[in-house]
Image: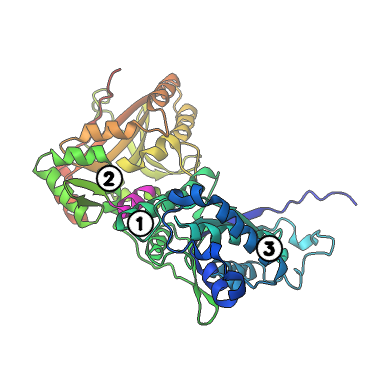
Amino acid sequence: MGKSNHQTKEKVVKIITPVGTSLLKNLKDEYSDFYDNENISSLENEKSFYERYKRREKTLKEIITEIEEFFKSNKIPPSISAEISVIDKLEKLYFPNSEKGSETEKKDGSTSENSLNKETVKLEVHLFPSDSLEGYICAKAIEFYIQNREEWKGKIEVKYHKPIENLRIDSKEKFEKGIENLINKILEIAQTEKNFSFDNMIFNITGGYKAIIAYLVTVGQITQSRMYYLFEKKDEILELPLLPIGFDDKVVRLYLPLLQKFVINQLLNGNKEDKKLLSDLKKYYFIKEEGERIEITTFGRLLRHLENHFTGSFGYLMELILKEKMGKYRDKNELDIECDIEINVKKGINGDIDLLKKCDNLIEIWEIKSLGQITKFFAGDEKNPRPQYSKYLRFLKENGEGKIKRLVLFIYLLKTSKTTDLIEGALQNEKFDFKAIQQKIENEGIEFKIKYMEIPEKFLKENILIQNIEKLKIQPYNFKKE
């Protein structure tokens, strides 16, 4: 029998699972003979995993081995821990025919013709233990349980992560740092995988400290990821609804780029308008006072990390404002040349051109970004890893023969006393080499410019902003010379 040309695509669904200590508690409650040993009892009320691991390494290995042997010799149900219970329910949700066999699956493992080219699913469980010896033991035991549950083989993989440093509840300050570390680890998963989508991420918010739930729900709402919680009384999982709410788009676009230490220090030493912006950052709980210092809150850091996942209409409003201004704005070399200006046009490239300007001797693309979005222009993101500027270079080369070709990055940002310093700081980014990109564009025979518009804080309401279009200025950013 010849080989089929059809291929089945595999979708990997990642299940983010903070790990608490319910497994040890349930072992103690349901299997008291096993739990009644000095090794386990001696770990209660221990300090941080990272403070104690070296000293207790031998004991920890003995306990984990004991649990693994106990699991091997006893038929332990998934209810042994809250984390495993949710995974068990998700396995049944994603593989409803697993017990009786899929209707399209043959005994030899091949698939029938009507199932070819369909997507298969694999669940990938990511375990994140708290910063405690007990959390570490539970995570290793859960890892062993998943790896060795016969009916899950081929359907569920497990990835163990080291305990999240400072994720403890004996110190408010440490807990906030621990939450930040947890979110960073989750984002690392998203950022290191090509073509990753949060559509394929699930938050199992049952395990771990209850205080974690609010933060993970916030991440889930922002990224529109699914979230599941074990409704213990009924032994059912509850899927949390994705609410039709969002953040104020203009606040996200304009305030989040200010959440950098060097920016905050500049605002502290700035003018009256700068001090008002600091007050706004405190009001939104993006920053907080810690003694004589001002620190970025965990919430602020979270939103900054997820900045590119926000959607809204403020960017479209800026496009309309820019087109209105462009009708009166001329570069010196354009003088009185009439230009056609289009916005939101598709010209055979993957994505919209924000603004296209065409004259007899000029073709010019304007890409409109808030200050916090420029990384996407120069380096792409997890959904579209190809930098945006490279697409526009191709379009200009193919459509600009015999004309001046120009690419303009237009940045809008809040007005401060240090605007050019903010832009310079944003261009000094570890994710892209601005000078190299600038040189690459110019080597293609294309002019590259950066222009910007400052938006005063008092103009933030849309109706006021529109009423004051005349007061808004398009300004050139002068590149700093080496």
- Is 3 inside the magenta-drawn segment? no
Query: Residue at image x 38%, y 55%?
Result: 179
Q: Looking at the picture, how far across and down is residue 117, in whole percent?
A: 71, 55
How much space separates mark 2 and mark 3, taking CA atoms?
50 Å
Q: Amino acid at mark 1?
A: Phe
Residue furthest front as drawn: 38
Residue furthest right as drawn: 1
Disc number placed over residue 69 in the picture, else none = 3
Q: Amino acid at mark 2?
A: Leu
Q: Which residues are magenta?
A: 297-305
Disc number placed over residue 308 in the picture, else none = none
Using residue 396 as the reference point, say whether residue 245 is left or right of it: left
Q: Looking at the picture, how far across and down is residue 42, in whole percent?
A: 49, 62
| Contact check, label 1 and label 3, Cβ < 8 Å | no
Query: Residue at image x 36%, y 38%?
Result: 374
Mark before the other along the chain sequence, 1 or 3? 3
Q: Which residue is mark 1?
A: 175
* Element assignment for label 2: loop
Residue 124 seen in the current view: no
Q: Is residue 58 above or below residue 373?
A: below
Q: Residues within 10 Å of mark 2 (few under 14, many from 20)?
A: some
Q: Is residue 86 above or below residue 140?
A: below
Using residue 229 as the reference point, say whether residue 143 is left or right of it: right
Disc number placed over residue 259 in the picture, else none = 2
Mark 1 or 3: the one toward you: 3
Q: Nearer the viewer, residue 454 or 163?
A: 163
How much space separates mark 1 and mark 3, taking CA atoms?
34 Å
Mark before the other along the chain sequence, 2 or 3? 3
Query: Residue at image x 57%, y 70%?
Result: 35
* Element assignment for label 1: helix
Q: Is residue 133 above or below residue 196?
A: below
* Element assignment for label 3: helix
